Amino acid sequence: MESSANLLLLLVILLNFFILGSSRLAACIRTAALQGSMLAFVPLLMHPISGHTLFLAGSALALKGFFMPWLLFRAIRQVQIRREIEPMIGYVPTLILGTMATAGAFIFGDHLPLIEAHRGTLVIPCGLATLATGFLMLITRRKALTQALGYLIFENGVFIFGLLLTEAMPVMVEAGILLDLLVAIFVLGIVVNQINREFSSMNVENLSSLRE
Amino acid sequence: MTTLLVLIPLLFAAAAYVLPSDRWRPWFLPVGGFVHLGLVLKMLAEDAPLPVGAWVGIDPLGRLILIVVSVLYCCCAVYGLGYLRFRLKWGNRVFVPCLLLFLSAMSLAAEARHLGLLWVAVEATTLASAPLIYYNRNRLSIEATWKYLLLCSVGIALAMLGILFVAYSGLPKEHISLQLDDLLAAAAHFSRPWLRAGFVFLLVGFGTKAGFAPLHTWKPDAYGEAPGMVGALLAGGLTSIAFMALMRVMQVMAAAGEAEVARQAFVAMGSLSLFFAAVFVIKQPDFKRLLAYSSVEHMGILAIGIGIGGVATFGAMLHMVNNALTKGVLFLAAGNIHRRFDSKRRGEVAGAITVLPLSASLFIAGFLAVTGSPPFGVFISEFTILRGVFSAGHFTLGGYFLVMLSVIFVGMGSTVLAVTLGPPSERANKVDYQETLLTTGPPLVMLLLVLVLGLYLPEPVRKLVLDAAGLVEVIR
């Protein structure tokens, strides 16, 4: 069980690289959806199956795998864009940064003392690497929508950490967190639309009149 | 009682959304606000014991935050009647319900005794306030909204990570609880590396919402582009809530015996915030952005107060109250001036005192109060913090603090005086807007409150502040 969970987590890391290197928005959203759905299965592999883990897996699959990607797809249909324009840092340098961050995540993960039951799991490095991927997307991309996608990946990273604590966390809190995340993506989607209407493009570069 | 404080604004929000009339909808704001204030006062009078182990409950810190937020909200709500009447054409079907949702989320955050619930409530305040910043519906306000949403959401995601780390530091155990009482009881056995890493994430996360430098970049944009009353609620309410969340973290750190690490981090953050505020206040031509940097400054002062501890913690709690009320005065007055001149730039706005005598006087008085001039309350609280700093032997920090405060005084003063005094600029009659009792009364009330807090600290208030400070500090 442990090894199959680790295998999924390794795949999640691979998907991080795919998202960092791809310029087609639809492919990015699909990859994020795939990543979210894969993550939804990890709690089932890591913990004994119970009502709680089933709820978590089910709602994560529905939200991260289907609903949020659907919202983002709807947004790109409405604003008619296909590709990320040249990002602030090119794709290859971003990929190199991503690789370095992933390596760093593995090194840093070694320094945090895990309890006996969690030895040998890839949760910590994978979570940190996914956080770094989301962060890179947030700071290097110019389209508002890709930034929203970056936020989604970032949240996936936090979710991976949460996996260690699934048994300990009350369902109510998890439900609240997922709900807040959903609303956040929803509001971001609305704002993306407004940006598009106001500037007839979604480039965040337009959003640069407010500065000192 | 605790549920009513959250539920009532929520119900009012729903009712406001359903009501079709833009003319009557704003009335939900003061009615909801005053019912909320009434409930808070009743709760203060009853002084019910705190249920141990419950997810919601009102402890001394929550009490202090609730009363501050409620008073500020009521003033803004009355002001909102006047403001929304002037902006009748823009509609308020989203604005009014979101304001009430914002109040509801802030109340929930103040009551939360569970870190997970606290997180949910703080994130809800971000989401409820985003549409408020976008009220002006132009390019600048959408830019501000986007930055605010993205930065605060990422910040709050980091805070979630911090909470997970803190929870993990309690393993291995059958059941980890994020309930505050349980956390405080178990904190002594937490794993140090996890707890410290968690603290850093929480400090950065909630610190982004509070607006410590260098995480403050959303502040000038959001405060600058949002309507004045929203700026008042963000600068007085939202930042106080974020500060309270940090105090919860501080409680856990203190219980774990790691208070020293947390203190140093707070002092470092606070000193940096003062520096950033001082640099950006000088030659700041935009008087609303000026207020944003003043907010960064005061968050820095709060952080230094907490970081020094002892009597400075008492000063910091009192300062939070004073800061919230003074920011209310400044933003509401600035909103009036902005509306009349249709500009918020120094040079384009001048001589406001001739056309808007009351608002301009309030703006000057608010400026004097916020920079710590006697006899206003801010003077007393800053003085208390400084006394703490010097009596703890941090002479360099104390000197630095004083220098930064004087730089900020001069920087703010030059813009505030240029905007208010002198002959009126040609834009003075650009918009036919007259100040009314509704738009000048509320800031005046808040100014009087700050004045009273400076002249004489009533015993119940003193006890409230002392109890709140006692949660993170033993005051000798």
Image (cartoon, rainbow, N blue to C red):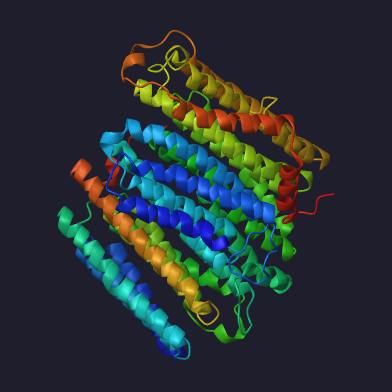
Q: Is residue B395 above or below residue A38?
A: above
Q: Quadrant of residue B317?
A: top right
**Quadrant housing the N terminus of chain B:** bottom right
Q: How many marks?
A: 0
Q: Nearer the viewer, residue B328 or A202?
A: B328
Q: Is residue A92 left or right of residue B51?
A: left
Image coords of residue B327 (percent x, y): 54, 35
Q: Quadrant of residue B429?
A: top left
At a point 48% along the width and 43% down the height, the residue shown is B234
Image coords of residue B2 (percent x, y): 57, 61
Q: Is residue B424 left or right of residue A144?
A: right
Q: Nearer the viewer, residue B158 or B19?
A: B19
State whether residue A191 appears in this view: yes
Q: Is residue B321 above or below residue A23?
A: above
Q: Is residue A175 left or right of residue B293?
A: left
Q: Is residue B343 above or below residue B397?
A: above
State whether residue A6 appears in this view: no
Q: Nearer the viewer, residue B97 or B48?
A: B48
At a point 28% along the width and 63% down the height, the residue shown is A21
Image coords of residue B202 (percent x, y): 57, 59
